[in-house]
Amino acid sequence: MSLQKDGVQKDYADVEATLTRITSHTGVQGIVIATHEGSVIRSTLDNIQTQQISTLVTQLAARGKSVVRDLDPEDDLTFLRIRSKKNEIMVAETKQYLLITIQNPNELQKGWI
């Protein structure tokens, strides 16, 4: 039992370290970790943004997953990237959750110049 507790603490520490590493990148505005149903597990954004992003992006990811499966029933969606003039949304999908990262693509370009 104590090994499970240590394992959970280690997993939590790994998640926090990963979130810190991702948020330290130039242009990253926030991260949302959500279930496939849209329930928020963790977020670095405010409540309104978190709910809006988790709801809409989980629906979009489900649609993307469906399209990939329709094209090839043996394939599966693993990563989705959407870029607009103001934002870039990146979604990494696992069996348990979605890792959604929002970043400003204009900030990325400033770093390259």
Image (spheres, grey):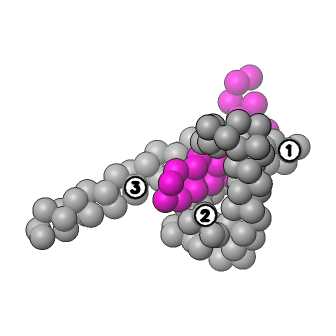
Residue at x 11%, y 68% (from the top left corner): 2
Toward the viewer: 45 or 34? 34
Give the CA separation, mark 1 to mark 2.
Answer: 23 Å
Looking at the rendered image, the disc whose residue lies closer to the viewer, 3 or 2, is: 2
Q: Is residue 105 left or right of residue 27?
A: right
SS under mark 2? loop
Residue at x 62%, y 54% (from the top left corner): 100
Give the CA separation, mark 3 to mark 1.
Answer: 28 Å
Q: For residue 58, say whether it is visible.
A: yes
Quarter placement of the N terminus: bottom left
Label whose residue precedes the other's in the sequence (3 or 2): 3
Q: Quadrant of residue 43?
A: bottom right
Identify residue for label 2: 36
Residues drawn in magenta: 89-113
Give the CA separation, mark 3 to mark 2.
Answer: 18 Å
Residue at x 88%, y 43% (from the top left corner): 85
Q: Residues within 10 Å of mark 1 (few under 14, many from 20)?
A: few
Amino acid type at circle 1 is: Ser
